[in-house]
Amino acid sequence: MTRRTASPWSLVLLGIGAFLLVLAPMLAWYVEPRAKRTPIDVDQITVFKGTGSYFDTEKIKTVKGQNLTITRQVRGDVADSEKSGNAVWDVVTSVDPDKSLPAADPHDALQWTQERWVTNRKTNRPVHCCGEKPYFEGEAYLKFPFGVQERTYLWWDSTLGDVVPLRFVKRQKVQGYEGLLFRGEVAATKTGTRQVPGRLVGLRDRPQVMAEEWYANHRIELVADQRTGRIIYAAIGPRKTLRAPGGKKDRTVLLDSERIAFTEKTQRAQVDLAKDDSSRLKLVGETLPLVALVVGGALALVGGAFVVRGRDADARGPHGPGDTPEPNRPHSGTPPTSLQPTTK
């Protein structure tokens, strides 16, 4: 009778190899997609700087060639995020000339807004719940979706109150790290009305009028990390003006800058975050599955070869192929006189 005995080590190698072969597709197709989720425990500040014009309420006129700073703080509401299953972010943005910095009191800022953004953690699409403010649409705001593509995206502009098409331009490096550059513009658009002295819009004979607020953006430039969608560079050129009711001409400039962009410090911080997040996703989605596939395949082949080899050796036995001769079998090679009583 043949006994099938394999080396314990060959079985261990075979088992580990099989496990790694199963693990590889699980990491790539199950774990990595679930790791692509917008974080909810964020707390970060981005700073834009540039020069331009703004309406000085103390001087009651537009002053030119001034330093302008945009400070944006994003904080995740972890409790509401976990409760809803979405990414709930509270966003505070202030626009300041030098004289109102540091922006300790929002009443001193040239412009101050507080918003609440709720997005699907997987798709980055807006979700209208949890005290969202304002209502917004589009594909991207504050970040792009995971796996950014070389195509046009609809970017939400809260000042405009609508989406802006951002066209893919090229791949561009920021602080030595490559991302995807997108550009767009906003043509002059009426965004609301405001009661102001008539003389601000050329109507000196009227003490107060409901002036029209107009907004444009010379250029929006965003560079996004392809894997995570994180913005590593941003530059905008906002222009806000007042016109007389039904007027065709800007009468007072409230804010105007050709370019306000991420500071060097903000660029470095965003690039570091993008590198860290991207490397983790690459580790789970590419590196570990490939290593598990290669190592698992090698171990499975070696372990399987040892198992087959051990069985073949056991089947051949010490005298060659076939079963080992039994001592009581005829023609076993043992003299009959030593096994059977004599008939003499």
Image (cartoon, grey):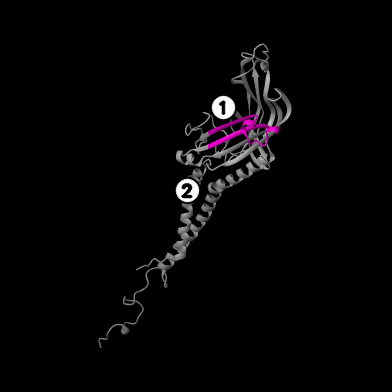
Residue 19 magenta: no
User: Up-down: is 220 above or below 42?
Assistant: above
Foreground mark, 2 or 1, reads 1
Task: List the residue tagged with mark 1.
Answer: 163
Q: Which residue is pictured at 50% across the width and 48% down the height? A: 27
Sort mark 2 into few (<14), some (14-19) or many (20+) by Cα contacts within 10 Å.
some
Residue 103 magenta: yes
Q: Nearer the viewer, residue 146 or 64?
A: 64
Task: Please provide percent x and percent y for residue 191.
Answer: 59, 21
Task: Please provide percent x and percent y for residue 179.
Answer: 63, 39
**Do callouts 2 and 1 mark residues in contact (Cβ within 8 Å)?**
no
Q: Amino acid at mark 1?
A: Val
Q: Is any part of residue 188 visible from this angle?
A: no
Q: Is any part of residue 133 visible from this angle?
A: yes
Instruction: Specify start and end residues of the magenta stretch as a single range.
Output: 89-116
User: Up-down: is 189 above or below 228?
Assistant: above
* Quarter that holds the N terminus: bottom left
Q: Which residue is pictured at 45% across the width and 40% down the height? A: 83
Task: Please provide percent x and percent y for residue 71.
Answer: 64, 35
Q: For residue 204, what is the image quadrant? A: top right
Q: Answer left or right for 140 relative to 203.
A: left
Task: List the residue tagged with mark 2.
Answer: 26
Q: Which residue is pictured at 48% across the width and 51% down the height? A: 23
Q: For residue 255, what is the image quadrant? A: top right
* Quarter that holds the C terminus: bottom left
Cα–Cα span, label 2 and label 1: 38 Å
Residue furthest to the top in view is: 205
